[in-house]
Amino acid sequence: MKVIVLGAGIIGISTAWYLAEEGHEVTVVDRQPDAALETSFANGAQISVSFCEPWANAGAPLKVLKWLLRDDSPLLFRPRLDPYQWRWGVKFLLQCSDAAFARNVEQLVALGAYSHASLKDLVDRTGIEYNRLERGILHFFSSAKDFEAGAQGAEIMRQHGVDRRVLSREEVLKVEPSLASFGPNIHGGTFTPSDESGDARVFTQKLAQKARERGVKFLYEHDILGFDLVAGEISGVNVACQRTGERRTLRGQQFVAAMGSFTAPLLRQIGVDLDIYPAKGYSATLKLKRPEAASVVSLLDDTRKIAISRLGDSIRIAGTAEMAGYDQGLGSANAQVRCAALVKRYEELFPGVADASEPNYWTGLRPSTPTNIPYIGHSGKVANLWLNAGHGTLGWTHGAGSGRALAELMSGKQPQLNFGFCGGHALPARRPQISLAPSVR
């Protein structure tokens, strides 16, 4: 079966890899000159199966209201004359209940566990190196109230089979001694030793190269313009080469939309309406002046809602979310405030450890759904269109599993996890009958 995958982030490349393993002929299209140059480029670097709580919870509406006037707030909703933003906001509020939270957590944990197992197997088989640290994730709290809430959250995760441990201040500092100077401000923490961290961009680009060696074709620097639709089926996708201006139509039997936040506006052209809206996230990557004094366990700072991960001789500080449309710039005063806040917080936690004079700032659009649950499966409306988008802040965590699960669904198999796939697990009525080659192990 000839499959065209639209998007070369961690989701698209993982999908292409697993489709190739199932014996399909795969072409990947992306507007960037290489894989993982947008949302997958400089994220928080965490594989956070155990820290996957949805944004929508019973206490979220009040917090969002408090944060509205703060440019450095963890989650900032900037109202726009955009009906899709307002629709997303209303649906988000409808998810802010204990029942919805529990339901959504269950699916996210299931996908996370499946994906983590898939990633480990993939790394074992390919030997890809990407500054991986298997030292867990430590979430620390700077107030007694927040620590109490964190302990309650840990109990919820344990009910779903997650080994998320509640730690005292002393135990937090034993797990990560480099926090000692900030220790008096820490009230406690939670820790999951099974989680890990690593560079998503490095991993994705290396996996793309492995996929190329397996026969996957890549069309980089190609803009995706739209689709030719015939009798409820895509007959081709229209693309334009950025270097030559040449336009052409790529023909395929099945198509996968994995373009992150840009999936939703593109698919509206053909009547597929997804509740995906971009949440602009920021990161700063700093060179370490004193590597021996830097953290090695991946951290979550509850006060600022940021992630801190070690990547060799660099440190990545990432976080905040701004619901403000599709702007990807770093030049605005607000963007500068949010970037500076990341570096300032790191200096508070680890004074003098990193070189803050030349921070490498980045911003990316996290493709967020009101539930935080991604769209994985058949589109339901277009016979040969499949979805793999809407992963929000968990694209790196859920990348391998999302790609594997979709490839299995497209090959007529049933993924082994309890997850609400799109299209009710149904395959397109006119899916071509193919003979699958065995996967290479």
Image (cartoon, rainbow, N blue to C red):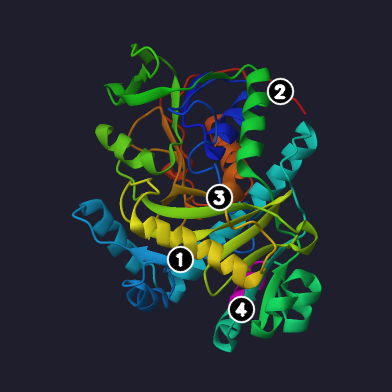
Q: Residue at x 52, y 54 (%)?
A: 283
Which residue is denoted by mark 1 in the rendering? 55
Classed neighbour count for the residue bearing mark 2: other residues with Cα under 10 Å, few (<14), some (14–19), many (≥20)? few
**Predominant secondary structure in magenta?**
helix
Residue span colored magenta: 153-160
Q: Residue at x 36, y 26 (%)?
A: 224
Query: Looking at numbered disc 3 in the image, what kind of residue is underneath it?
Result: Asn
Q: Which mark is residue 43?
A: 3
Query: Looking at numbered disc 2 in the image, what kind of residue is underneath it?
Result: Pro
Q: Are marks 2 and 4 in contact (CB under 8 Å)?
A: no
In the rendered image of this protein, does residue 166 appear above or below residue 95? below
Which residue is denoted by mark 4 in the rendering? 141
In the rendered image of this protein, does residue 30 appear above or below residue 80? above
Q: Quadrant of residue 337?
A: bottom left
Q: Position of residue 284 (x, y in %)?
A: 55, 54
Mark 2 vs mark 4, foreground winner is 4
Looking at the rendered structure, the secondary structure element under dot 4 is: strand
Query: Looking at numbered disc 1 in the image, what kind of residue is underneath it?
Result: Trp
Q: Earlier in the sequence, mark 4 or mark 1?
A: 1
Q: CA distance from mark 4 to mark 3?
A: 22 Å
